[in-house]
Amino acid sequence: MREPGSRRPPERACAGRRGDHLLIRHVLVTGAQVSGREVVVAALARAQNALPLTRATVVAAGPAASGPPLGGAEGGAVTVVPGRGLRAWLRALLVLWRAGPDPAATHVLHTHGSSALLLACVLRLPPGARWRCAALVHTNHGFVETLVARRMLGPAELFLHRFADRVVACSPRQVARLARGAGRPVDVVVNGIEVPPPVTARRRALARARLGLGDRFPVVGIVGRLAPEKRHDVFLTAGEGIIRHFPDAVLVIAGDGPRRDEIRRIVRERRLGDRVVLLGHVADTAGVYAALDLLLHTSDTEGTPLAVIEAMAAGVPVVATAVGGVPALLGHGRHGALAPRRRPHLLAAAAVRVLADPALRQSLARSARAHAAGELSAERMCTRLGEVYAAATGG
C-alpha cells in the first residue's frame, strides 16, 4: 500500500495535457440492477463538480444506467447509453470515440469495472488516438468470485490493469492482489457517500409507518442486490436465530436481483411470511435505514460495501461478515460487530448481543456515524482521488 502520488506516469507527447482545467470522464458499464458502484460514482461526480476548475461527467452504459442514482447526478452531465451486453459496450465506445478530449484541458478517463477499463484501453489503442492524451485511472471495486465465469475473468482484468496510469483499490485487502496484476503499487481510496443528517425520532416513526412496522422490535435489515454473493439465505437463517430471542422481530430485505424467486421460496418453506418484509428495489434507501434497529450484512465476498457505509452514516448498528474491506470499515470491531462468513449462528449471536444491550447499540451507532462523517464522505474520497489524478497527469 502507498500514498497517492508516489509514482509518476510515463511521459506522453500530448499537447495540452496539462491545461488549467481538469476534465474527468467517469466510465462504467452497469448490470440489470443498480449496484453500489453507480451510487458511489454519482456522489463522486457531484463532489468533483463542486470544486473550482474541475468538471466531471459520466458515461454510463447498460440497463441500470438511466435510472437513479446516475439520473440524479446534479451538476454533472450524465450520458446514458441504452442497451445491454456487447451492444451497450460498443455504443459507449462510439460515444467516447466521437467526443474526444478537449486539447486545452487536462483530461482523466476514470473507469469503474473491468468492462469500462477494456473500453478505455481500446479507445487509447490506435496510434495517434486522441484519448491517448488523457490519463487513465481505474478503480477496482472488488472481485465477485462466487460464479465460475467471474473467477475465469479475474486474470484478464488484472492484466488490463497494466495499461492504466494509476490503479485504485477501495480497501487495503485488495492491494496485494491488484499490485501483482498491475505490476506496480496501488493507491487506496475508500468509497465515500454523501453523509445524511441524523435520523430524528419523527423521521424514524414515519419510516416505520410507511413500512407497516409500527413499534415492532427489533427490525433487522439487509440492503443490496439479491445476488449469490450477498447470501440472503444466511441472512434468513441468522434471522431465525434472532427471532428465537426476540419473538417480535421483523426481517427486512431491500433490493432486487436474480435470487428473488429463490429467496421467496426460502421464506415460504420456512414459514417466515409474517416475519419477512420483501421491499424489492428501493430507489431511496434512506427511509429503509431510518426504520432499522440493525443492519445484518451477510456477504461471502466484498470490496467496500456501500450498504455498510450507508448504515454507519445513518447511525444504524452493523453486524457483518468479516470479508473484503468490511473489517477496515468497522474499525475491526470498534464501529460494528464482525463474524465469520457462512456462520449464521455466530452472526445471530453477535446480533442478539448488540440488540440486547441498549448502551452497546448507542455506542456503536455514535462511533459508526462519526467515522463515516470523518473518513467515508464523498468529499474525502474526492480529495484523495485528486492526489491520484495529479500523479496520473504528471502535476
Image (spheres, helix red, strand yellow):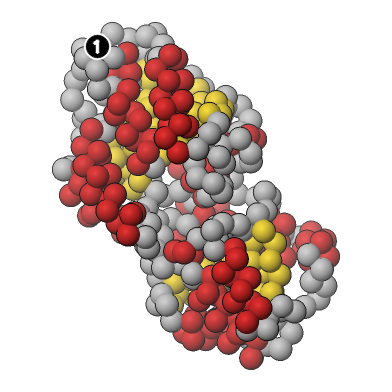
Q: Is residue 160 visible?
A: yes
Query: Residue 143 location in percent, x, y?
Result: 35, 54
258 shown above or below 236: above
373 shown above or below 212: above
Residue under circle 1?
128
How many numbered badges does the structure rendering display? 1
Residue sitting at x 43%, y 20%: 94
298 shown above or below 37: below
Q: Nearer the viewer, residue 27 or 48?
A: 27
Q: Is residue 48 visible?
A: no
- The crowd level at tag 1 (other Cα within 10 Å; few <14, some 14-19, many 20+) is few
Give the SS element for disc 1. loop
Q: Nearer the viewer, residue 367 or 95?
A: 95
Query: Residue 264 location in percent, x, y?
Result: 63, 70
**Figure quadrant of the C terminus:** top left
Residue 106, quarter of the rendered image: top left
Query: Residue 37 location in percent, x, y?
Result: 49, 46
146 shown above or below 339: above
Query: Residue 42 location in percent, x, y?
Result: 55, 38
Residue sitting at x 74%, y 84%: 248
Residue 244, quarter of the rendered image: bottom right
Report the residue that reaches farthest toward the bottom: 244
Q: Amino acid at mark 1?
A: Gly
Residue sitting at x 52%, y 54%: 306
Q: Nearer the viewer, residue 268 or 193?
A: 268
Residue sitting at x 45%, y 38%: 85
Q: Is residue 195 left or right of residue 11?
A: right
